[in-house]
Amino acid sequence: MIEHNKTLITAEDRKALDALLQTGWISQGQEAARLEDLFVGHYNGGAACALSSGTAALFIALKSLGIVAGEVVALPTYACSALLNAVYMAGAEPIPVDVMPDTYCLDPNNLNIQAANARYIISVNTFGVKSDIANLLGRGRILIEDCCHSLGSNWFREKELGESDVSIFSFYATKTITGGQGGLIWSRASNVIESAKDFRQFDCRDDYKPRFNFQMTDIQAALINSQMIRLQAICKRRKEIAQLYANALPQGFVCQSKILEISSIPYRFVIRAPNIIFRDALQKHMLDSGIRCIVPLEKHELLHRYLGLNPENYPVSESLADTTLSLPIYPALKDEELNSILSTMNEFQL
Ligand SMILES: *Cc1c(COP(=O)(O)O)cnc(C)c1O
């Protein structure tokens, strides 16, 4: 079976982990600090705070940006429920907004209609395509850019990230680079990162306010740092595979727009069928050949559905849930597996 996703932990990664274990320091320490430095180097400035997960990063970002109970946060409905959880943890109110049919990212026009007065926005670079940041900003809005799918993208574009107020990342097992779990906030605003670091741990303080335990262990950080060395090569490989898939799309299917652009990192290669019959048929055809493709977000997982809102107000996301299919794309994919995926796609007929 060719699985939809697979981690790639190399001999070098295991060596780095072993070296860390031999130091005897396994809680948050020098390796976590080194990861933060890597991000500052990667983004050419700003500051970073390593955390225990992407969800923690979203929550701590909201807290550090000064959100107070009852404030409103706009977010794409075509996204994972981690966004809702973080907003609720912060005592705020989430407002799902429909996405664009071509990039699957938050639609700035819908934002102005569905959540015109939201002061905070969480925008996801869905499957590795940069969301329309320029058109989401303005009106005094505060923008959190969810980069869990787009790690590495700024190495491939001229203009650096950093237009948004905060960027957040996840190092969960299925992500481009993983420590099993892990998260990080990066921002140009050093006061936001200082605040994040204050919230991150509670022990040995002179004063009291509610603080948390959202630390990344050095075990996680050592594994992540070792993979970070390969980030550029990992992204290049993903881009190569994406190009091969784009050239072999079955008739009637289209790929996510902008996924092949230089600034995108194909974290997922999600194609769109003309209708649910084509989509389900291709998924079955692939599975019959031992290739697992998944529906990236099922209808019941759409955030407006979780919240019991009227599906008629979210037609694009509803349609995406019916028509999208995610193909295996990861550097651990062997050449013969890749060839098998390509030829199986080629044989598809409805
Ligand atoms: C994975 C993910 C998260 C949550 O990260 P965790 O580390 O699993 O908590 C949030 N947003 C997006 C877009 C993600 O892909």
Image (spheres, rainbow, N blue to C red):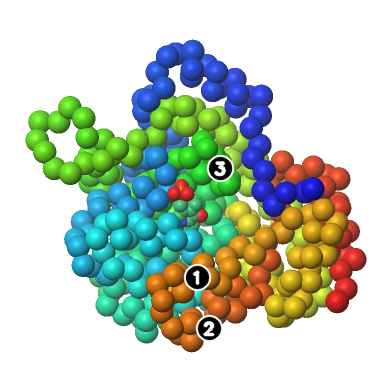
Q: Name which of mark 3 and mark 2 comes first in the sequence.
A: 3
Q: Would residue 160 appear left or right of 197 to someone viewing this image?
A: right
Q: Nearer the viewer, residue 189 or 29?
A: 29
Q: Name which of mark 3 and mark 1 comes first in the sequence.
A: 3
Secondary structure under tag 2 reads helix
Amino acid of disc 1: Leu
Residue 315 disc label: 2
Label 2 CB-ligand 1 distance < 8 A: no
Q: Position of residue 313 (x, y in %)?
A: 45, 85
Q: Residue at x 52, y 49 (%)?
A: 151
Q: Is residue 147 visible?
A: no
- Mark 3 vs mark 1, CA separation in Å: 22 Å
Q: Quadrant of residue 111?
A: bottom left
**In the depicted structure, whether residue 56 falls above or below residue 29:** below
Q: Name which of mark 2 and mark 1 comes first in the sequence.
A: 1
Q: Position of residue 115 (x, y in %)?
A: 33, 78
Asked if the residues shown at circle 3 and circle 1 are in contact, with their CB atoms under 8 angstroms apart, the answer is: no
Quarter in which the C terminus is drawn = bottom right
Amino acid of disc 3: Ala
Q: Residue at x 71, y 80 (%)?
A: 275
Label 3 CB-ligand 1 distance < 8 A: no
Q: Nearer the viewer, residue 88 or 117?
A: 88
Secondary structure under tag 3 reads loop
Q: Is residue 125 visible?
A: yes
Amino acid of disc 2: Pro
Q: Nearer the viewer, residue 194 or 15?
A: 15
Alpha-carbon neighbours of circle 2 within 10 Å: few (<14), some, or many (≥20)? few
- List the single residue furthest toward the bottom: 312
Q: Residue at x 42, y 14 (%)?
A: 24
Q: Would residue 251 appear left or right of 85 to someone viewing this image?
A: right
The residue that mark 1 highlights is 302
The residue that mark 3 highlights is 173
